[in-house]
Image (spheres, grey):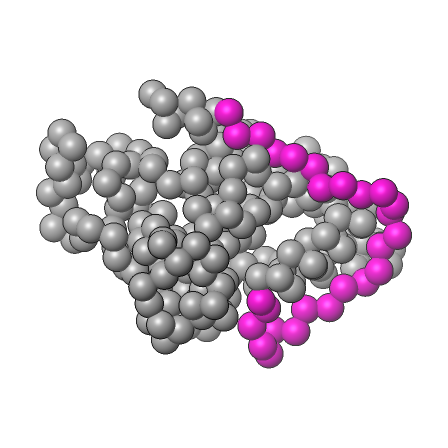
């Protein structure tokens, strides 16, 4: 109950925007975006008249902001989530490039994009695991709190991680009905899950334990009941699964 109340208490805080003076942005996917570049793009997107950017009041376990974007004014909400798994860095980069494309074309008075965003509102949580993303792209230097699970690994090991900085696979950490079938009381018995922190498939010592999971739960509870579509992006190499 306490964990669930923590989820309900999470707020989405608007990014400050003193002026709407949008400058077209560029995203070059021939190289990986650093998380700092990712944040700069979001701050600049916040200057578009068609985009509102927010941060969750709860941060990641290594104290990074988790962002959410609302793009458009339409009544049909389409939800996108990316970056749940650390090493699947294609998804956050694809989503932020899509957001940049929409903003650039809208501000350039593209009639198709204006019509699209009058019918639909795209609500995007592009990078659900920022610590994992930063460590996967830039390596161990991006682990700010070296006492975290991620503090024990090299650049090459972190590049292959799926988990968050605590060694918990967020995809398996949700307190869903199917996940609960893997537990007996407080003891996990599911053969496919690991029983201690890992770069891969550890579901956590209890479900719903991670800050990032709680932010995602809040996002899902807030928007999914009213959504036209909900798309969760995963990937393997250059192949994107939605």
Q: Judge whether residue 42 can be spotted in this image.
A: yes
Q: Position of residue 201 (x, y in %)?
A: 25, 55
| Quadrant, the N terminus | top left
Examine the residues drawn in magenta and state their main secondary structure.
loop
Vertically, is 180 above or below 102?
above
Q: Which residues are magenta?
A: 9-34
Q: Position of residue 211 (x, y in %)?
A: 43, 40
Q: Position of residue 71 (x, y in %)?
A: 70, 45
The residue positioned farthest toward the bottom in the image shown: 30
Front residue of this view, candidates 88 and 104: 88
- The residue at 49%/32% (across/down) is 218
- The residue at 16%/32% (across/down) is 186
Q: Is residue 188 left or right of residue 124?
A: left
Vertically, is 92 above or below 139?
above
Q: Judge whether residue 163 can be spotted in this image.
A: no
Q: Is residue 6 left or right of residue 185?
A: right
| Quadrant, the C terminus | bottom left
Q: Position of residue 190 (x, y in %)?
A: 14, 45
Q: Is residue 12 magenta?
A: yes
Q: Is residue 182 magenta?
A: no
- The residue at 69%/43% (across/down) is 53
Dividing the picture into quadrants, the one containing residue 73 is: top right
- The residue at 39%/25% (across/down) is 4
Q: Is residue 207 left or right of residue 115?
A: left
Front residue of this view, candidates 131 and 32: 131
């Amino acid at each position: 109950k306490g964990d669930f109340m923590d989820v309900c208490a999470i707020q989405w805080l608007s990014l400050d925007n003193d002026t709407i003076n949008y400058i077209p942005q560029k995203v070059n996917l021939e190289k990986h975006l650093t998380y700092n570049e990712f944040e700069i793009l979001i701050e600049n997107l916040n200057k578009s008249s068609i985009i509102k950017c927010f941060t969750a009041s709860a941060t990641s376990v290594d104290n990074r902001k988790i962002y959410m974007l609302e793009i458009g004014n339409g009544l049909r909400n389409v939800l996108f989530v990316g970056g749940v798994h650390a090493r699947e860095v294609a998804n956050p980069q694809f989503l932020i490039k899509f957001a940049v494309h929409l903003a650039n074309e809208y501000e350039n008075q593209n009639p198709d994009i204006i019509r699209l965003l009058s019918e639909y509102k795209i609500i995007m949580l592009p990078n659900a695991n920022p610590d994992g993303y930063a460590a996967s792209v830039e390596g161990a230097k991006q682990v700010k709190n070296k006492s975290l699970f991620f503090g024990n690994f090299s650049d090459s090991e972190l590049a292959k991680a799926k988990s968050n900085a605590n060694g918990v696979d967020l995809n398996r950490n949700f307190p869903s009905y199917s996940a609960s079938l893997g537990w007996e009381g407080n003891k996990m018995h599911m053969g496919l899950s690991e029983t201690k922190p890992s770069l891969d498939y550890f579901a956590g010592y209890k479900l719903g334990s991670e800050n990032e999971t709680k932010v995602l739960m809040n996002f899902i509870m807030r928007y999914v009941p009213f959504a036209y579509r909900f798309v969760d992006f995963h990937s393997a190499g250059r192949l994107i699964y939605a």
